[in-house]
């Protein structure tokens, strides 16, 4: 079974969705072989390198009040804890394009899942900037990627065209919110679903196949 997980590093529900999906796959076990690929999506492609205050950004973008945003943060903390992900404070929103370029490269190196996990934890747990070169290089080092190769990628436009092409492809397929989980190029599950929902859907699709 091929699973494309379309998401953005800056998306907290993507962390919930990924950890839920992985829990569902653990419950199903090795009887269902899976190829998991991470595909790029930018919630804020025009975000400047300096980033923006999270509360200001979300209030303007979604028209949410501080009380509503606080309620969402608490829901995220609870949902994350249920699947083993810890949310900390995230005071700023950052540009994630360079993170997606490195994720593309990491996929070629067989380390994409490891880098995805490292990026989600760096931002959502530790409030690190996933667009900062020093943060990205440190994460690459931690998961065993070639740091000098990563540095060269960040200093160039390498993989920029590939990332933008994948983003366009999924937008043209009607993907406008994340996480979006696409199974075998034809079945779509959207949102930070609980493990039970993913498990049920995956079992049904596997049985139908």
Image (cartoon, rainbow, N blue to C red):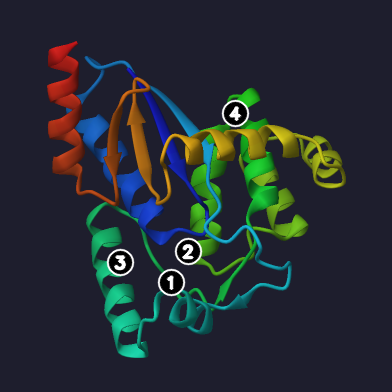
Q: Which residue is mark 2?
A: 124
Q: Which mark is residue 169?
A: none
* Residue 55 picture location, percent across and down: 48, 83
Rounded to the nearest whole Å, what is the CA distance between mark 3 and mark 1? Answer: 10 Å
Above/below status of 18 relative to 24: below
Number of residues whose C-alpha sits closer than 10 Å to that of mark 1, classed few (under 14), some (14–19) or many (20 or more): some
> Taking the image as drawn, is residue 151 in sight?
yes
Front position among marks 4 and 1: 4
* Residue 83 picture location, percent across and down: 26, 52
Residue under the point 39% across and 66% down: 87
Q: Which residue is mark 4?
A: 107
Residue under the point 44% across and 34% down: 173
Q: Are marks 1 and 2 in contact (CB under 8 Å)?
A: yes
Q: Residue furthest top?
A: 209
Rounded to the nearest whole Å, what is the CA distance between mark 3 and mark 4? Answer: 28 Å
Secondary structure beneath disc 3?
helix
* Residue 115 picture location, percent across and down: 57, 41
Secondary structure beneath disc 2?
helix
Residue under the point 55% across and 59% down: 122
Q: Are marks 2 and 3 in contact (CB under 8 Å)?
A: no
The one of 148 and 44 positioned closer to us in this rendering = 44
The one of 40 and 127 positioned closer to us in this rendering = 40
Q: Which residue is mark 1?
A: 88
Rounded to the nearest whole Å, what is the CA distance between mark 2 and mark 3? Answer: 11 Å
> Taking the image as drawn, is residue 144 in sight?
no
């Amino acid at each position: 079974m091929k699973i494309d997980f379309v998401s953005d590093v800056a998306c907290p529900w993507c962390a919930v969705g990924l950890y839920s999906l992985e829990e569902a796959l653990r419950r199903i076990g090795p009887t269902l072989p899976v190829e998991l690929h991470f595909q790029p999506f930018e919630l804020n492609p025009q975000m400047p390198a300096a980033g923006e205050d999270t509360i200001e950004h979300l209030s303007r973008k979604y028209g949410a009040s501080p009380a509503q945003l606080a309620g969402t943060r608490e829901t995220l903390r609870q949902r994350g804890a249920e699947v083993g992900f810890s949310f900390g404070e995230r005071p700023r929103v950052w540009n994630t394009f360079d993170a997606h370029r490195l994720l593309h490269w990491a996929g070629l190196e067989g380390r994409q899942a490891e880098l995805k996990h490292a990026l989600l934890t760096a931002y959502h747990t530790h409030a690190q900037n996933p667009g900062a070169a020093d943060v990205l290089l440190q994460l690459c080092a931690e998961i065993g990627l070639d740091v000098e190769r990563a540095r060269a990628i960040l200093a160039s436009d390498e993989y920029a065209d590939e990332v933008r092409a994948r983003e366009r492809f999924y937008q043209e397929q009607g993907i406008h919110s994340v996480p979006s989980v696409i199974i075998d190029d034809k079945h779509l599950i959207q949102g930070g679903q609980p493990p039970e929902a993913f498990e049920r859907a995956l079992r049904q699709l596997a049985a139908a196949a």
